[in-house]
Image (cartoon, coloured by chain):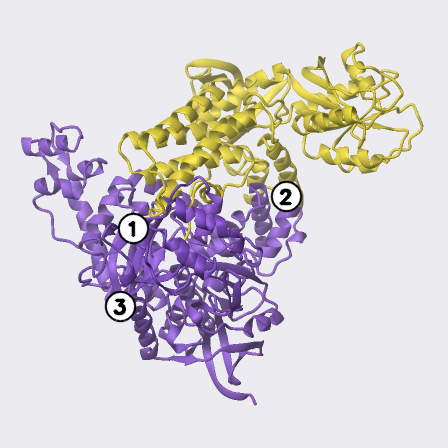
Amino acid sequence: MNYFAGEYDVAVIGAGHAGIEAALASARLGCKTAVFTINMDAVGNCPCNPSIGGTAKGHLVREIDALGGEMGKTADECFLQSRMLNRGKGPAVHSLRAQIDRRKYSDTMKHKLELQENLELRQAEITDIKKTDGGYLLTTRMLAEFLCKTVIIATGTYLGGRIFVGEVSYESGPDGIFPATALGQSLKDLGLPLRRFKTGTPARVLRRSIDFSELEVQKGDEPPQPFSYETENMGENKVECHISWTNDKTKQIILENIHRSPLYAGKIEGVGPRYCPSFEDKIMRFKDKPRHQLFIEPCGLNTEEMYLQGMSSSLPEEVQLKFYRTIKGLEHCVIMRPAYAIEYDCVDPLAMNPTLEFKNFEGLYGAGQFNGSSGYEEAAAQGLVAGINAAFKVQGKKPLVLSRSNSYIGTLIDDLVTKGANEPYRMMTSRSEYRLVLRQDNADERLTPIGHEIGLISDERYKKFLNKQELKKQEIKRLKETVISPSKEVNDILVSRETSEINTGVHLIDLLKRPQLDYKALAPIDIHRPDLDPNIFEQVEVEIKYEGYISKQLKQVEQMKKLENKSLPNNFDYSEINGLRLEAREKLNKIQPLNIGQASRISGVSPADVSVLLIWLAQNKNR
Amino acid sequence: MKSETIAAISTAQGEGGIGVIRISGEDALEVADKIFKNVNGKHITDMKGYTAAFGKVVCDGEAIDEAVALVFRAPHSYTGENVVELSCHGGIFITRRVLRAVLSAGASLAQAGEFTKRAFLNGKIDLTEAEAVMDIIGAKSKSAARAALCVKEGALRKKIDGVKNDLLSLAAHLSAWADYPEEDIAEVTDDMIFDVCEKAEKTLQKLLDSYDSGQAVKQGIDTVIAGRPNVGKSTLMNLLSGYEKSIVTDIPGTTRDIVEDTVLVGDVILRLSDTAGLRNTDDLVEKIGVDRAKKRLENCGLLLAVFDNSRELDDDDKELIRACGDVPSIAVINKTDLEQKLDINYISSNINNIVYISAANGEGRDELTKAVEKIAGTENFSPNEGILSNERQRVAVENALASVREADYALKSGMTFDAVTVSLEDAVSELLELTGEKTSDEVIDRVFHNFCVGK
């Protein structure tokens, strides 16, 4: 017998990386919030790589932190090793990545949820969702019913999850946890456009069974850098990673057994990514490549499980063991958890607005892998936005829509809801046209004022931020006013850096503009330099050096903003507008863009169609 | 925020008469002043609205033409903005050179229907006319899209595609290298970038050098005569060229090959090819001819679609009418001396230009001449594929070249690869715009295609 169990402002289905940020944000904004998880021990689980961040993902984590999210802080608390990737390739692509203790991360996040005011963490599988007058009725496996004003679906790979290992296949969530088997049908009945995606993970092997003696070691940066602008003491790097390579023998075994891969045998119907989701994919698609790199990463301090980054597979367990054992260092490896592919239900994100609310279902939101993305960081970013918007909905406030020009989070969501996702969507720096503006070093400058306005950044932290901005301003002023006179010491430094000598006094800022020079090189001749937060120096240096590029991109940002300020109506039938080409009408009807800017990014909407829309808008405004 | 100043030739282009170049926007007077030297020495910027001046259009110190400048001050102009109209001598060569001078003085080339759009947005056109304005933009964008080299083949497209591919591969390599630092992707070296930039610069510069606005029309327009068998294509060709070249018989399918001839129609030179009829056939030899004709049809500069007045439209005719939507075309209704069975309404609702001839009697040649001249005078008309032939193409190539040079310069001055990549991607999107492709995910598509990246 069903029983009535309570009412919530915001209910979050799933307590993974998306669900956590969604639930914390909504509770912190004052909404009575529940977060449902199938298994209490799987909160904030990292079923794939034991790391947070990486290219473009590191940007996302910094942005989540700048807005008042939790991922960055928890990653800092649980970090084992931290590295800034892409040093030397330019500030736009610098990306922070941290190896983390995955059990500790999970425990820490769970505890944070438990301690959060307004928030209830519950172990329950949601099996049914129904639209009611003022919201949605959720039913659990135990037949409890909850009346919720808004609901955020963050089911990850649990929804209709099915695992494939060679010829073996069974219904399951990740890491052997129960899947959500009933909710998918209920969502379909509700009318959501679901489809199947797939992803995979490599095996975990026993540390004692690996011979590290001849493997290349990868150490963390000294000192390690935090993700969070609030983390003050990071402590030391605690672990090392190792690098090894596959070889001809590895390839041979894959080729001999490829018919046993469920993907190549045609058993998986889900759409995998164009980037290689498994090692056998790498072999099949890039046959000429003689060897592939892999990273051996520890899963935590209190475990001997090691993650083999780059070695995802859905081949049978015995074949996995065979090909892993061809790799140097892994000759005697023991598999603790086999690699697997997992297929799951997710939604077509074109059905959503940039607020992550479904167009045809008021108060219903989606976040994370359910929306067709891939990765913990992408999930958390969407969770944060969905949580904020669900809370704002309940409170009758204007929703938050981040833009492509202020964040990777905005870019991620805009891509999903404007272009759709035909494969699990992974963030990349190449996806941002404003990447010299959207850097990981200035995430606070871009987003902390917004986080404060939303109410997720405390007054205290905001004051600190404003103070930092003031110091930065003063430092730029100092560089503009300080004159360096020519001297042997000065010119020796310039010559050693292969840049031209000076023979008259030069402002410090003009020296810093030279690509060959940086703060470090100028230290001996910049004797009155104040002692500032290293992040200030980093931001100042980048802004000075890349001034021309940054101002060019800012100009493009301004142009786009003008278009984004022109709102389009909701649920409008574009076939009524003469002059639009047929393809444009169809696409506009499907996507229902919020504004002209979003419309202009839809494939199939030409500049002429945009002109027609502008005229149509002007015509309607005057009426 | 200032409105960008735009310019375009606003009269039909063709030999003789007067050509008008319209400049509109906040800086219209300043832009015009840079290239217009008044005989009495007074600057355009000092002129009142609704006044005119006589003088010379000067570019790089050289006088291009004599012209009359008409000054309109906002809001009293067609667009509601400051406007200068330069009336110079007509003809494609001169009007395009004047336009080019105006663009180099700081104006941007107007988009399809942009003057009308601005007139509307500035309240100069009544609201009830909005529908018409949208239609105009829709129609004009079609010819602009055509000029955007939507054609998949052709010499110019191949040159542009070559450069675009090189730049795209390099941008993808840089992206893969930056986005997948742990994937063992070959390092991008300075030399690789310099090589690609140098090659791209050379090709683009050569294209720009070859740009001579009159050249393309002087060389002639690639013109295809098409229609189902025995409709009178060969007869039309003979009518135009004045002597028999194709074999003319009454058995359908006798013309199996493309015949070339060059004729002068009014002021316009046409390079004619008579094609095999478009019909499905089992005859192998004829099939080759038909396939070749279809290809030719997709790539031509002007399509003369011939229909038989005395027969009803069939599927082959309808396919031809569809093809007319993709290229500038004229429907030629032949055999008007016979009883009409053809559905003219169906044709006229799909093809704007229709002429009636009786090829056998030699009637309708004047009508045809007028229609050809009218089409050749359209602003976005792209007569053939080998060289840059209109201002839009030239501007795109020039911008792409500037971006390639910027990338090259950035690298030489020691900037990091992220800055270089941004300039390379700018160049790619300029070229994609020229070929009418959507820019958004090209680089990422290429990353996944070319590089072994994964989880």
Residue identified by numbered label 3: A459
Visible residue check, residue A196: yes
- Placement of B281 over or under A416, stated as above or below: above
Residue type for callout 1? Ile
**In which image quadrant can residue A559 be found?**
top left
Quadrant of the frame with the C terminus of chain A? bottom right
Q: From this viewpoint, which residue is outermost toward the top?
A: B243
- Placement of A306 over or under B308, stated as above or below: below
In this rendering, the label closer to the viewer, 2 or 3: 3
Q: CA distance from mark 3 to mark 1?
A: 45 Å
Tell me the chain of label 1. Answer: A
Instruction: State which chain is coloured yellow.
Output: B
Tell me the chain of label 3. Answer: A
Q: CA distance from mark 1 to mark 2?
A: 61 Å
The reply, left or right, for residue B369 in relation to residue A537 is right
x, y percent for residue B216: 59, 18
Residue identified by numbered label 1: A243
Task: Report the front residue among A570 and B233.
Answer: B233
Task: Report the front residue among B231 and B138.
Answer: B231
Q: Are marks 3 and 1 on the same chain?
A: yes
Residue B134's disc is: 2
The reply, left or right, for residue A204 in relation to residue A238 is right
Tags 1 and 2 touching, CB below 8 Å: no
Give the SS element for disc 2: helix
The reply, left or right, for residue B442 in relation to residue B310 is left
Task: Report the front residue among B66 and B239.
Answer: B239
- Sequence-wise first label, 3 or 1: 1
Q: Residues within 10 Å of mark 1 (few under 14, many from 20)?
A: some
